[in-house]
Amino acid sequence: KYLKYQKYILDIQADIYLFNQNYSIKTNIEINIYEINKYRPNFINQTLIELYELPYQFQAFDFDNNKQTNGYLTYYLSNCFNYCPFEINPNNGILNLKKQINFIKDHIYD
């Protein structure tokens, strides 16, 4: 078995209208890819830094033969818990802002 590691860092700004006011949310997302088989996932999106519209779907594939175990991808935000403005679907990689009811208006998200 092989262990491969690759890192992407994205700077994201999302402008939203919330509670009758405009807000700008800035954050960065670090994508860590760990691969314990022969092939690591490759992103279909040619460049990840052109993240300008939410929802955004991260799409990846790999060349491992057994798609039930080796080719299965799981997406998660590792440092994004209670006070995170973003959420990601673990099965399909869709990144989105949380719904308005989940925001704390006066909180600084970092």
Image (cartoon, rainbow, N blue to C red):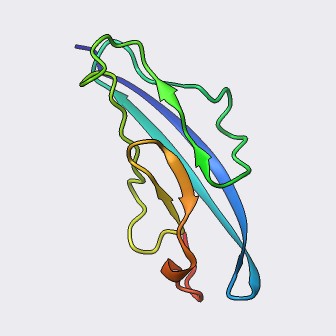
Badge count: 0
Q: Nearer the viewer, residue 67 or 108?
A: 67
Q: Quadrant of the C terminus?
A: bottom right
Measured along the vertical axis of the image, is residue 64 above or below residue 102? Answer: above
The spot of residue 76 in percent (x, y) is 39, 49
The spot of residue 86 in percent (x, y) is 53, 62
Side of 98 relative to 74 (left or right): right
Measured along the vertical axis of the image, is residue 25 above or below residue 73? Answer: below
The spot of residue 41 in percent (x, y) is 44, 24
Q: In terms of image quadrants, where is residue 70?
A: top left
Q: Name which residue lies at 67% across and 26% down.
A: 46
Q: Nearer the viewer, residue 103 or 92?
A: 92
Side of 53 relative to 64 (left or right): right
Q: Quadrant of the N terminus?
A: top left
Considering every residue shown, the one lying at the far right of the view is 22
Q: Nearer the viewer, residue 92 or 27?
A: 92
Measured along the vertical axis of the image, is residue 36 above or below residue 73? Answer: above
Q: Name which residue lies at 42% across and 53% down.
A: 77
Q: Name which residue lies at 63% across and 30% down.
A: 45
Measured along the vertical axis of the image, is residue 92 above or below residue 81? Answer: above
Q: Nearer the viewer, residue 41 or 34?
A: 41
